[in-house]
Image (spheres, rainbow, N blue to C red):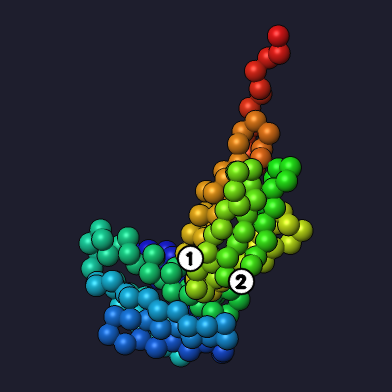
Amino acid sequence: MSRVGKKPIELPKNVTVTLEDSICRVEGPLGKLEYRIPSGITVTHQDSQLLVHRQSDEKLHRSLHGLVRTLIANMITGVTQGFSKGLEIEGIGYRAKVEGRVLNLTVGYSHPVNFPIPQGITIEVRDQNKVLVKGIDKQLVGQVAAEIRNIKKPEPYKGKGIRYEREVIRRKVGKAGA
């Protein structure tokens, strides 16, 4: 039995969960999320808890058991508290600003990079070099943060580029002078 999967999911009072067919809908103060439960996994609603069960001890069902429980728990956390991922922009002249639904980045290219902000995501820019990606869907927040980081990954010599908050960049020593 999966240690993660057998733990019940506590439901806060301000969250409603509806289970129809194989779709789990979670609604809370910050919004709504939906997840299609894979075959072989069942979710039941008891009192103020959700329980995740699997049909058999088949390898696929065992691996999905803990995953589904964690994804539903993340949906509940998302609609109550939300998720955020911080990015830092390091480099002389590197900066970011939000214009409408577009994040405008100046990161050492000959042109500014315009990153369209997807639905369900809000982006805040603090001090021109700190970007905060927020949303209710944990996977989408991480995906958008990774896409922004990929625009200019930190380089190992001076550390210039876009990196996650508290990410440590392994530095290299430059070539020895003549």
Label 1: element kind: helix
Residue 135 visible, this orientation: yes
Residue 164 visible in the snapshot? no
Give the residue displayed 62% in from the left and 54% down from the top: 105
- Any mark on residue 3, and which? none
- Residue pushed farthest right? 127
Nearer-the-camera pick, 167 or 131: 131
Amino acid on which disc 2 is placed? Gly
Please state, as top left, top right, bottom left or bottom right, where the N terminus lies in the image.
bottom left
Describe residue 103's horizontal placement relative to residue 24 as left or right: right
Q: Residue furthest front?
A: 110
Q: Horizontally, is 79 left or right of 166 in the view?
A: left
Residue appearing at x 52%, y 83% in the figure: 31
Q: Position of residue 99 (x, y in %)?
A: 64, 67
Please state which amino acid type lies under the numbered disc 1. Answer: Leu
Measure the C-alpha gap from mark 1 to mark 2.
19 Å
Number of the label disc, if any, that sits on residue 140 = 1
Q: Between residue 146 and residue 64, name the one nearer to us.
A: 146
Where in the figure is residue 107, as x and y percent of width and height?
64, 47
Q: Quadrant of residue 110?
A: top right
Q: Nearer the viewer, mark 1 or mark 2?
A: 2
Above or below for 50 versus 86? below
Please name the residue shown 61% across and 52% down the image.
Answer: 112
Residue 45 position by quadrant: bottom left
**Which residue is drawn at the image coordinates 52% and 54% (left, top)?**
146
Q: Is residue 155 above or below residue 40?
A: above
Vertical placement of residue 126 versus 41, above or below: above
Q: Position of residue 127 (x, y in %)?
A: 77, 58
* Observer-nearest of 44 and 28: 28
Mark sitting on residue 100: 2
